[in-house]
Amino acid sequence: MTAFRLPSGGRIDRGRTLRFRFDGRSYTGYPGDTLASALLANGVHLMGRSFKYHRPRGPVSAGAEEPNALVAVGAGARHTPNLRATQVELYDGLSATSQNRWPSLAFDAGAAGGLLAPLLGAGFYYKTFMAPGGAWHRLYEPAIRRAAGLGTVPGGPDPDTYTQRYAHCDVLVVGAGPAGLAAALAASANGARVFLVDEQAECGGGLLAEPEALIEGKAAAAWLAEALAALAARPGVTILPRTTAFGCFAQNFVGLAERLTDHLAAPLPGLARERLWKLRAGRVVLATGAIERPLVFAANDRPGIMLAGAARGYLARWAVKPGTRAVLAVADDSGYAAARDLARAGVAIAAIAELRPHVACETFGLPVRPATAVVGSIGRLRVAAADLRPIGGDSVGGGGVERVPCDLLLMAGGWTPSLHLFSQARGKPVFDAARAMYLPGEHRPGEAPDGLASAGACRGVFGLAACLEDGYAAGEARGGPATGRRFAVSGDLPPAGGFEGLVPGSPARKAFVDFQNDVQAADITQAVREGFRSIEHVKRYTTTGMATDQGKTSNINALAIAAGALGRPMPAVGLTTFRMPYTPVTFGSFAGHARGELFEPVRRTPMHAWAQARGAVFEDVGQWQRAHHFPAPGEAAADAVARECRAVRQRAGLFDASTLGKIEVVGPDAAAFLDRLYTNSWARLAPGRCRYGLMLNEAGFVMDDGVVGRLAADRFHVTTTSSGAAAVLHHMEDYLQTEFSDLRCWLTSVTEQWAVIAVQGPRARAIVAPLVEGVDLAAFAHMSVAECRVAGFPARLFRVSFTGELGFEINVPAGHGQAVWEAVWAQGKAHGLEPYGTEAMHVLRAEKGYIVVGQDTDGTVTPDDLGLSWAIGKAKPDFVGRRSLTRPDMLAEGRMQLVGLLTDAASAPLEEGAQITAAPPRTGMAAIGHVTSAYRSATLGRPIALALLADGRARIGQTVHIPMPGGSLAATVAGPVFHDPEGARLDG
Amino acid sequence: MSRFSLAALIRHAFAGNTGWQPQWRAAVPKPAYDVVIVGAGGHGLATAYYLASEHGLRNIAVVERGWLGGGNTGRNTTILRSNYLWPESQGLYEHALKLWEGLSRALNYNVMYSPRGVMMLAHNHHDVQVARRHIHANRLSGIDNEWLTPAQAKAFCPLLNTAADIRYPILGAALQRRGGTARHDAVAWGFARAASALGVDIIENCEVTAITRDAAGAVAGVETTRGAIRAKRVGVVAAGHTSVLMAMAGVRMPLESFPLQALVSEPVKPAMPCVVMSNTIHAYMSQSDKGEMVIGAGTDVYTSYSQAGGLHIAAHTLEAICELFPAVRRLRMLRNWAGIVDVTPDRSPIIGLTPVPGLFVNCGWGTGGFKATPGSGHVFAHTIATGSPHPINAGFTLDRFRTGRLIDEAAAAAVAH
Amino acid sequence: MLLIRCPVCAMDRPELEFRHAGQAHVARPADPGAVDDAAWAAYLYLRDNPKGVVAERWRHVHGCGRFFNALRHTVSDRILATYPAGASRPEVAP
Amino acid sequence: MADLTPADPGPRHILRGPAGGAALGGLIVPDQPCRAAEAGPRAALWLGPDEWLLLGFAAVETPFAVVDVGHRSLGFRLAGPRAAELLAGGVPLDLSPAAFPVGTCTRTIFEKAEIVLWRRAEAAWHIEVARSFAPYLCDMIAAIAAANGIGGQER
Ligand SMILES: Cc1cc2nc3c(=O)[nH]c(=O)nc-3n(C[C@H](O)[C@H](O)[C@H](O)COP(=O)(O)OP(=O)(O)OC[C@H]3O[C@@H](n4cnc5c(N)ncnc54)[C@H](O)[C@@H]3O)c2cc1C
Ligand SMILES: NC(=O)c1ccc[n+]([C@@H]2O[C@H](COP(=O)([O-])OP(=O)(O)OC[C@H]3O[C@@H](n4cnc5c(N)ncnc54)[C@H](O)[C@@H]3O)[C@@H](O)[C@H]2O)c1
Ligand SMILES: Cc1cc2nc3c(=O)[nH]c(=O)nc-3n(C[C@H](O)[C@H](O)[C@H](O)COP(=O)(O)O)c2cc1C
Ligand SMILES: [Zn+2]
């Protein structure tokens, strides 16, 4: 047992000793310890360095509000920076290091910066480092960046997993102190679904540190155990310790972060490190307690200076004496509870400096000095003495200051109700002038926050009995009769009093308000002097409240000091905004399982496995994976693509087009509906025939395209682009449900119903014919569709071509895709059939001047720009997008038009996206267009390109210039169709 | 205005830092001004500054409903770049970037312009095409933008996961080296201080509640929570609130206001030397000088003025961040917030005249107007002072929505094929 | 994340199941060819964007698939009413 | 304690049109939102006011629009005392028996996959998921089970 551990008591398990390391040194502690309590038990107060001045710091609190004792735990990829030692649960083998110091915590070279502190006041960096130009980025910024920051980024990809869960309940109770426990007991009495969550390892809140109190005749700890057992026995109740309610959103949606394994030396393999709960509650009871305020006086930041309630907590919960000789600076009655408990544990109470002129509560015979302030401290890595000065005493000379030696200096500055979640839920805090504290405001029913109540210390109700009763009432079912349940309590010492702002008689320099960010009272007054009158400006200029603790201990003091400097009352200055998260939450738990293939679904076609076995190289197209090309062993990509293209042009190619979007449009008005959604006319398309359809958005720009086949008078099989599928269906449903709801037709997505096997090339018919039953292929003209059987399976056979060759697209039910594909493959062997991928498909279609929406169009392109005016049904009165086509700019000269570009046959293909100029390019010259598609055409033995070119059709035959990385190339403008312009090859 | 400098810092330090003067005057509204600017964000303050410094106007008020810089200027992820696609946008953002380069010295305020490089990732062929198109267009215009291979991207940002087997592997990146960041608050304060020194009245806690018009329909002034102010020229620079203000003058706008979220991690030692953006998987990250990872999330799907967004929006971004930077999974979110951004149908701003004589508007910056702050103020000041647009903002009219002459930066990156 | 009552499913459902679809009651001109450029631009682009109650369209895309309308307060994000597409805007106390 | 197994419900069709309340192959097409009607091997699941997923019908005789979607999705059965807990890892709906009683069916989402979820018994669920999303759904369910210590078959 270590020197500062009491021989008995506390909520630790003394049956087992845990070994741990801090900055390389070994120590011991017990299960139930936090890293902070264990280090304090070993006499270690120095645990960290502050952000700016690198001042030595020890824990000031025992919980989530801790600004100082930030450490890193673990190593390598599991290294976790910026953890509060007050919340790190001890386990055997834990290894922690201090941060923001070099070379060591005790001797930190960075602390030398403290000497320059007067130069480094609020906002100093805005006022200098401006010259010479660029010096900021090259010189000063790197230095400042190195000095700033706290811990370091983990050493590699996080090996741990994170999980998430949705949950729904009738009542969520946040905080399992007396108020929360009572609320949960009341809320669950009738079998309601109740969640009770607490961020700490153990439920109990304030009850965990009430050694003397009796509740209904039982010791507080015993009452707590019984209450928890009673709750656990109710089937509707879920109790989650180690769970922080970090965010409160509209309609009682609350984010909970549950820590599952960080406290374990060896977690079960696979088990998640954290669980993020996304909880929707009927009602929320906030019972989040209050946070004690430090007192702001000079040098109030040395190790060994802490909050009185924290010291009391260390004694009661971990049996740790945080020092041997204490001075207390008290402005609130609760300080006397701490003094009493410390004294009983054998800590000498050197003095109690009571800020208030009189003390109303019991003082247990301790040496109280009313109307006395602590105005300074001395010590190096640990407080050695406190400077006490009578208030109102002569501040100049007069010997007013008395230096009292101590190794522990406790601050009882009063309690700040925790309004974080209330305020996140858009509750309005109101200032209670009499008690000088912000409390949750009342709200009218129907206003945010609806169904959200606060209970206990977080709404300024102090005292155990009052908290229990307040909690119970808040938990009781709404609408039911209030039972007015009472709790008999004795022996607690409720807080009363408090102080905010700079302690009278203390200098403002080195009087820290925000410990972590090293914001002093003087910084705040300076900010006000510099014209930062809004508290939001003061926050940003000084960075007060912006550290990892988000000002839990500092905001009210900062506000009071700012208000004083402004000469305005606190409520007139106002609070800064509370934001999620209440305490920091790992990115990992927000991301949950979304990692690798679970980050975004990977969609694969029914023939994926075949392509994979065949060595295909895949590309991502939206969520889909598509075979890009099929290299033979050792074959370069470009060679594979050229080979695939030649196969299609000379024999036949096999292509997986399953990702195409497909929508079945059924109903008596199906043709009329398509008439309004596509530019084309559909009424006279005969069943069994297909047509290329062009879809515009209402602004007149090309949105999607695809072949539409008419299966019957009232049934169309519509295809869309692969990545446009969902958007097109949504667009169609929108018009069908809201604009054209008179039409009787219905839409069903069949994208995944049909696998699509394209067979393209002069031998396509010969390959397909033996497999097809029920269609006379000889009479099956280009742009036909038929329902038939292929390879024994029901199929929709399209005779269409996206390559310019004779072609078929065989749609078969997806489950048969692979079988049919293999049947075609077997048939094709004798004909030299080869599989081809998306790249060859792109080349082949570009040779024919067929566009790819999204590549040759970009959302600013009209049908006429693409030379597709023929696809517009001229006789139709209206279709989506039509009106926009007559807007002035759509008819203006100089629109970008789709053309072909021919460069020197021997040159490399142009780069897609390359710009086009009218004359040899110079920097600053205006572009007249850009290359949308560019390939090496194996068929033509030359590079080809498609481009959008201003007045392009009028420029056919002219020379244009394309600036490329290696210099500019000249190109001749041509029509967009490079191969077989007559379309002779479509018939094989 | 006394100058800021290292010497001044030292001088004041010796005097106990008690001699500092207000950075801008706390002005009270006068009954009339030559120009009233509504909205003391970066753009409004810059407009006032350039009206005073370049057009010689002195009788100018900037009225602000809250605290200056408290709108989107004070809540953005501070990414600066000029590598836009269309000539109009290039002109505007490059104009701004040139001004950023000398801004600290022009304002005598360190706005911490940090040209650390903005790297925009490509994850599929379509991204590559779009990135290349931008690079080509930029280079022709003399704007720096270059293509990086995955290995080069990794060298530029070692934290980045460029493994080939991740869900959306990085196929390359477009890098603008002159792109980077600047300190958001300093921009607002620096312009405010410089404008105030030139005599501009910056009036905080002064909400415009009505725009008054004379018998001919021209602007006559504004009514505010601190009284009526007469002015023949009023410039509305109110970002997310523009629709509300323009409605006061009877003008409907092609705008929708959405909450846009951002978040920061706890501070850590330098690990991210540059800015990384991925439009495809929705993640933007840089590291502030204080050490936080500054992360931009998406907008909510519905219009709102609540300055708070949904949990799933931030979570979605963090999924992408963890995928791109797997070592940050253990870092923790310190704070999350939202601003209200005004989005036009073509995602480009509107800077210019309105149907109401004397009423000018500068809005529609959506998710990306911080980078334009000095340039936007500069050309808008010209527009107000001369009554007609500067050549740089000539295309950014309200009328373009009637003619169809959109400047569609979003469509240029359209994903569809 | 909003909780939205789908008037068709008659259930409160999470926002994730829905897709927002812009301002409600923006009628497509019956004869688009007959309206001038300004009116057409207004139909395409001008939106109310009020700080207050907005009438907007949602689609329960991962549910019943229906488009419907909602009245929502854009400051509190409280949904005041949901009603079928085509129905006229109900009166609600803001 | 929660098992995911493939379930083959046989043929699938989408029925669209004003068919609510109509008699079809021995069952009444449910008119009430989010309800499934079952008769022997056949079921009709309400997906929307004019949309039903028909399971197990070899052929459908109706005057309305019918589309064969037999291969569009895959079916899974998830059963066991912790099945609902497992589902809560990805489904944002309240799946308590009170809010989602036996016989309820609806389209919803499981993280990034759209599914049709049908509660067939207190602890037995049927899930339909588009074919290409099935691996994602299965992997996600496995990951959630592992991370939460939810085993498969009770041993
Ligand atoms: C989360 C987030 C991240 C962003 N990230 C980037 C980024 O990385 N890079 C980038 O370039 N841009 C980014 N932006 C966009 C950028 O912040 C804005 O485009 C830009 O700051 C707008 O500046 P502003 O001066 O026009 O508006 P604001 O700064 O919003 O100023 C408008 C002012 O008008 C005031 N006002 C409103 N109504 C009234 C009234 N009735 N009377 C008086 N005053 C009124 C407001 O209070 C406000 O102060 C981001 C935005 C957000 C929200
Ligand atoms: N004597 C003293 O020093 C002193 C001072 C203040 C309060 N008290 C006493 O403490 C008790 C206050 O009771 P109470 O129930 O209102 O508060 P409490 O402090 O006992 O309990 C609040 C609980 O909420 C938890 N919590 C806070 N925010 C949370 C979050 N976001 N997510 C999850 N958990 C969160 C805390 O960990 C704590 O356990 C009373 O008995 C009061 O008299 C005593
Ligand atoms: C680039 C940038 C960095 C920020 N860094 C911090 C930070 O370190 N700590 C912090 O508390 N807030 C930080 N903030 C957030 C602000 O505190 C604040 O949330 C934001 O300005 C929005 O204001 P509001 O939350 O008061 O509405 C930062 C904001 C920005 C824009
Ligand atoms: Zn619905």
Image (tube, coloured by chain):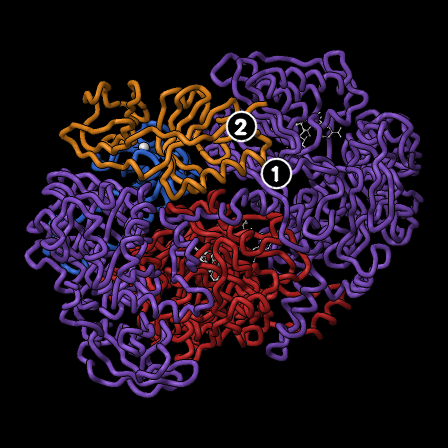
Say if residue A427 shows up in the picture: no
Where residue A222 sits in the image (x, y, percent)? 75, 17
Indicate which label's residue lies in the foreground, 2 or 1. Answer: 1
Residue drawn at point x = 64 percent, y = 47 percent: A159
- Helix, strand or loop under label 2: strand
Res. A284 mark? 2
Foreground pick, B141 / A294: B141
Q: Amino acid at mark 1?
A: Ala
Residue at (73, 54) in percent of width and height: A518
| A134 and D127: which is toward the camera | D127
- Chain shown blue: that is C
- Does the numbered disc 1 mark a residue whose Cβ is under 8 Å from ligand 2? no
Report the side of A920 relative to A101 (left or right).
Answer: left
State the red chain: B
User: Is A381 left or right of C20, judged from the image as shown?
Assistant: right
Rendered shade, chain A: purple
- Tell me whether circle 2 and circle 1 mark residues in contact (CB < 8 Å): no
Find out if the beta carbon at label 2 lies less than 8 Å from the nearest ligand 2 atom.
Answer: no
Residue closer to the observer: A688 or A114: A688
Which badge, 2 or 1, is on the more N-terminal residue? 1
Residue at the disc numbered 1: A272
Dot 1 falls on a residue whose secondary structure is loop
Chain D colour is orange
Q: Mark 2: few, some, or many residues within 10 Å (few <14, many ≥20)?
A: many
Asked if residue D15 lies left or right of residue B367, the reply is left
**Mark 2 belongs to which amino acid?**
Val
What subunit carries mark 1?
A: A
Q: Is residue D49 visible?
A: yes
Q: Mark 2 vs mark 1: tell me if same chain.
A: yes
Residue A556 lies, with reference to residue A777, above or below; the image says above
Q: Nearer the viewer, residue B165 or A833?
A: A833
- Pinpoint residue B378: horizontal percent, then vertical percent: 43, 72
